[in-house]
Image: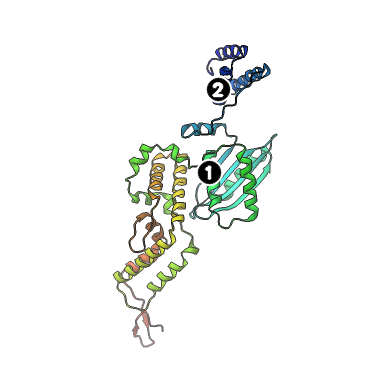
Amino acid sequence: MEADPTLAEAFLSQGTAQKDELTALFLSLLKDRTGSGALRRRIKGALYQLSQRGLEVPEWADNQKTGPAILRQTESLPLECTVSDFDPLGSRMLTLVIPRVPQGRILVFALANWDQGLEDLTALEVSKKQVKPLLEESRETSGYAFYPADPNQVVFLLREAYDRSPALKAEDKKVYSVLMNYLETMGPFITRPIISDLISRDEQENKAGGDWESLKSIPELMAFQLPSDRLSSCAQKLGEITSSPLVLNAGQQKERLQTVLQAAAADFFTPARVENLRRHLEEIAYLYWLKSEPEPARTLFSAAVRLEGETLDPKERENPFLGWLFEKEFQEIEEVAGQPAVEAETRTEGGLILPHWVKK
């Protein structure tokens, strides 16, 4: 009927001429499914005519949709959302533009980190004309690209980030509560990462046997940095080994460094943090999907699926990807330890060369 307005008009005229519950049910369903605004308005008029004639018009409610049906719902959500690229610490900006009656907007800026959750949340009441300049200013200030994103995904990310926020300010918690209450009137929103609907199960299974090594070429993971304040204890132990006055050959020194690194990595990657990292891989996968680069998106999402339940054992490293993320933070120390020992010459006034552990 969208393609033939004459046929649509004839059908609606006949439908309103009859007081039929099945016709009313069909029109109610069709109203929520059509992509034509003109046809939707005409159907609403027909339903109103039926209600005026005493026919109770049923409301079609189907909130249990999954998969592609949910993705189609996205088109009707009155939200405009974007996500930014990640910085090296795994933080990114989420923006939401929420319409308000009559013409105002709620502009939301959320800074979310893969491990610490929401770091900042700001909601502004602005006019429609103010939205574009404020968004452009945010992009220029951050220095990162922003991409239009599915509202379902952005609301999901916002909820996930809030749930893993250990030190969110009371003011931000209040803003979040008000914001989510408002968004609930516009839902329903999905409660899973949308990338799981974009990549088929067959594609996931085809990638399931992939090599962890392929992740090491992903720019976001190459630049990814773990929080330095949680690595200070390990760095201190590594420093003590490399500066120890004990005479160790290169092999012994490297072995001791590896022992310290494996124990520290196992302590850092708790089950909760591994789950956070898994979500982070899903977010990067969705980012590549937005960039129209499906191959790295599939690789990352497959890795996220395989990462579920993975751990690190201090005695036997079980996951090379987790170990690599941790060890590359201390790569410079390891490279120095792996080189042949070159002792700096320390001489007495008479020219005698002293061992490196003897201070002049």
Residue 54: give x, y in percent of width and height.
67, 18
Give the residue number, with chain letter if any, for mark 1: 156
Residue 177: give x, y in percent of width and height.
63, 47
Tell me if residue 230 comes above or below residue 349 in the rendering. Answer: above
Q: Residue pushed farthest bottom? A: 350
Residue 129: give x, y in percent of width and height.
67, 38
Image depth: mark 2 or mark 1 in front: 2
- Near-viewer residue (315 or 124): 315
Q: Residue pushed farthest right? A: 102
Tell me which numbered mark, 2 or 1, is placed earlier along the sequence. 2
Residue 170 figure quarter:
bottom right
Q: Is residue 248 left or right of residue 160?
A: left
Image mark for residue 279: none
Residue 33 figure quarter:
top right
Residue type at tag 1:
Phe
- Near-viewer residue (212 or 328): 212
Residue 100: give x, y in percent of width and height.
67, 37
Residue 22 figure quarter:
top right
Q: Residue at x 57, y 21 (%)?
A: 25
Q: Is residue 188 left or right of residue 50?
A: left
Query: Which type of secondary structure does the marked residue at label 1 adopt?
Result: helix
Residue type at tag 2:
Leu
Tell me if residue 213 comes above or below residue 130 in the rendering. Answer: below
* Quadrant of image for the C terminus: bottom left
Q: Residue at x 34, y 85 (%)?
A: 352
Give the residue number, with chain letter if any, for mark 2: 30
Give the crowd class for mark 2: few <14, some 14-19, many >=20 residues within 10 Å: some
Marks 2 and 1, how far apart at CA: 29 Å
CB within 8 Å, label 2 to label 1 = no
The color scheme shown is rainbow
Give the crowd class for mark 1: few <14, some 14-19, many >=20 residues within 10 Å: some
Q: Residue at x 32, y 72 (%)?
A: 341
